[in-house]
Amino acid sequence: MRILSTAILCLIAASPGVARSQNTPPLRPNRLGLCAACHGATGHASMPGVPNLAGQNLDYLRQALKQYRDGRRAAPVMRAAIGPLSAAELDALARWYSAQSPQPQAQR
């Protein structure tokens, strides 16, 4: 009985991480600050020439961030900003921005 109780307690302790489904919004990444300076905390850039990231495809963002970090995309500012980030941190940023709601296009 003691082994069973221990196993149940371990499952309960692990369940918050396991229970997160695809529909659960991602947590705000710890490393969002530097990205948010240009792209906005919710992916809506306020600077001219800086792309909005809100609602972008998750796989696209993952690949783009890896390419910037690895130098396969030539953008010194991006390389400096995300060069020291781990794969898990890049994934958290991609998940965050892809889950944000994009702004409607402005009427011209």
Image: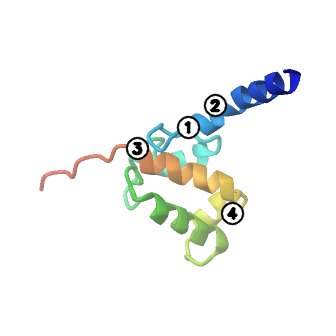
Residue identified by numbered label 4: 83
Number of other residues with Cα within 10 Å of mark 2, as a class: few under 14, some 14 to 19, many 20 or more: few
- Going from the N terminus, do you reach mark 1 or mark 4 first? 1
Report the residue at 43% width, 45% height from top: 99
User: Marks 3 and 4, how far apart in space?
Assistant: 23 Å
Q: Position of residue 62 (x, y in %)?
A: 54, 62
Q: Secondary structure at mark 4?
A: loop
Q: Quadrant location of residue 18?
A: top right
- Going from the N terminus, do you reach mark 3 or mark 4 first? 4
Which three-letter amino acid code belongs to the residue tagged 2? Pro
Residue identified by numbered label 3: 100
- Going from the N terminus, do you reach mark 2 or mark 3 first? 2
Number of other residues with Cα within 10 Å of mark 4, as a class: few under 14, some 14 to 19, many 20 or more: some
User: Marks 1 and 3, how far apart in space?
Assistant: 17 Å
User: Marks 2 and 1, how far apart in space?
Assistant: 7 Å
Report the residue at 56% width, 76% height from top: 74
- Asked if marks 1 and 4 touch (Cβ < 8 Å), the reply is no
Farthest left residue in view: 108
User: Marks 2 and 4, how far apart in space?
Assistant: 30 Å
Q: Is residue 100 above or below residue 4?
A: below
Residue identified by numbered label 2: 16
User: Marks 2 and 3, how far apart in space?
Assistant: 22 Å
- Asked if marks 2 and 1 touch (Cβ < 8 Å), the reply is yes
Which three-letter amino acid code belongs to the residue tagged 1? Arg
Q: Position of residue 107 (x, y in %)?
A: 13, 52
